Image (cartoon, helix red, strand yellow):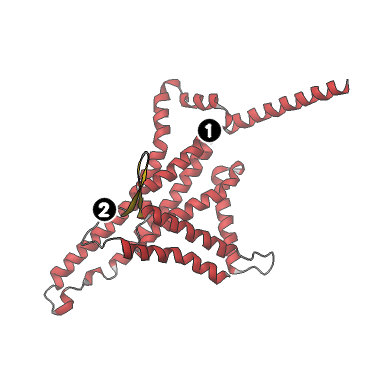
Amino acid sequence: MTVLLLILAILPIIAGIVIKVMFVPASNGIDITGAHIFFTIDLPFGGLPISESQINSWLVILSLFFFCLFLTYGLKTKDMSKRQIVAEWIVEKVEGLVRSNMGEFFMGFGPFICAILGLSACSSLLTLVGLFPPTSDINIVGGWAMMTFILITYYKFKAGPLIYLKSFGEPVPFLAPLNIISEVATPISMAFRHYGNVLSGSIISVLIAALLTTLSQLIFGKLPGFLGEFPFLRIGLPAILSVYFDLFSGGLQAFIFSMLTMLYVSGGFPEDEYFKRKRLKEAKKQNKQAIENTNGGI
């Protein structure tokens, strides 16, 4: 069963490679045109394009889903497998990250933060197998940022709408316009920070590869046969750059996006006002119940 789950975790990525080979036109030279659009669904309010970004995002989700099943299949309390040790290590690290940055009240955010980390990092790593990374599409990371913004606003409303509106006038009322702009700019800055860093890495890698190809033709172009066409200078250096742009930078941006999510959500939560309001509600409830009990006894 574990072997089957591991195969199912790999199959979506293989399917993505097959889809790209079959349906995405091959590029000549430098190609920085964004995600290929496979088809468009006609809707009453306009067309819905289905692109590489959406397909690859779902493939990453499926791959992570089966990988999680692979890690957690057959959990035991004794004689734990290496898979279970890895799964427990991931859970402990994510819970520690949430506890240190958000506090005990937000411990339920562990699965959500782990999902963001895994989805973002694995989406950026698709470039290692030649697939278009969804994190290079502003629509994808913009959706993640909007989801985070909804969570931020939801927890800001936890203490009531009046407290939320008052927060725009802090520390002084005349700063309210700037605070409103800052509120709107939060999802925009999160989306463009993630999207810009991943996309810039992909563009730089393509430009350097093209430059090395040109230099190789200038230096070795007079060699006989295929030797003159072989890009000798592209051996090794692009792989070293890929370690930074794909592995390090992709993982770093996933971590930064997750950290910003935790800090924005927990930082916008009016904890003191929330618990004060909660205590008042409980006191009113107890008083009401006491009055009902007294009337019932009479």
Residue drawn at (31%, 61%), measured in percent from left and top? 23
Query: Where is 46 relative to 122, above or below?
Result: above
Tell me which amino acid carries mark 1. Lys
| Rendering coords of residue 233 (x, y %) | 22, 69
Q: The N terminus appears in which quarter of the rendering?
A: bottom right
Q: Residue at x 54, y 31 (%)?
A: 157
Q: Residues within 10 Å of mark 1 (few under 14, many from 20)?
A: many
Give the quadrant of residue 124: bottom left
Q: Earlier in the sequence, mark 2 or mark 1?
A: 2
In the image, taking residue 272 as reference, residue 187 lies left or right, namely left
Secondary structure of the residue carrying numbered label 1:
helix
Instruction: Provide residue 120's location: percent of width, then percent of height.
Output: 43, 53
Q: Which residue is mark 1?
A: 156
Asked whether residue 293 is in view, the answer is: yes
> Which quarter shows the C terminus?
top right
Q: Nearer the viewer, mark 2 or mark 1?
A: 2
Residue drawn at (50%, 25%), measured in percent from left and top?
Answer: 165
Residue 33: give its label: 2
